[in-house]
Amino acid sequence: MLLDLKKVFSEEGQVLPFDDQMDLSDVDLNGCFPFVSPVSVRGAVKNQDGFARLKAEVSFDFSIPCDRCAKQIDTRYAYTFTHDLVLTLENEEDDSYIQVQDYRLDLDELIRADILLELPSKYLCSQDCKGLCPVCGKNLNEGPCDCNLHQIDPRLEVLKKLID
């Protein structure tokens, strides 16, 4: 969605509401496509003291395998993002403002970046997930397996003979 902010920047107190949906089903995260519903985006841009403040609320369904045990995690995320928009930047390195070129803002690109930065870096079905057995592959959350996990690395067998 491309927002035309000319009216917002020209009049103090002017508000531009928006309500849209984005399709992020083509976003690949670790070989998965976890966005299983369209992203609902609602909010407004309001002129305040010479700049515009964007406030957006997003929500979407998300489904991805656990990083430890591969169990599918289905959840619904909801985030709120705010940004201060300006027509010109005095300091190019100041990232607290977003510069709007020609009074137009690509809302989809901004919200997409916000969502991807807000998502967790590790997906776990629970904080105490035990993962999979490295030998047989059994899900250790369902109980212990019969594997001998204390196997000695064959390269270190020679050192064991010194102990004996």
Image (tube, grey):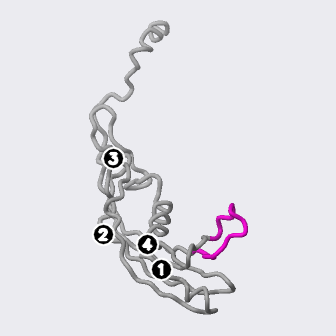
Secondary structure beneath label 3: loop
Distance from Cα at disc 4 to Cα at disc 2? 13 Å
**Quarter where residue 102 is shown:** bottom right
Which residue is tagged 3? 69
Magenta span contains residue 91: yes
Can you name the residue that lies furthest to the front here?
Answer: 102
Front label number (2 vs 1): 1
* Residue lying at 57% horizontally and 87% vertically, measured from the top left: 8
Using a 10 Å C-alpha cutoff, classify the residue at mark 3 as few (fewer than 14 neighbours), some (14 to 19) or many (20 or more): some
For the record, the magenta segment spans: 83-97
Which residue type does callout 3 highlight? Cys
Q: Which mark is residue 78?
A: 4
Looking at the picture, how far across and down is residue 17, in whole percent? 47, 87
Secondary structure beneath label 1: strand
Q: Main secondary structure of the magenta part?
A: loop
Q: Is residue 132 above or below residue 76?
A: above
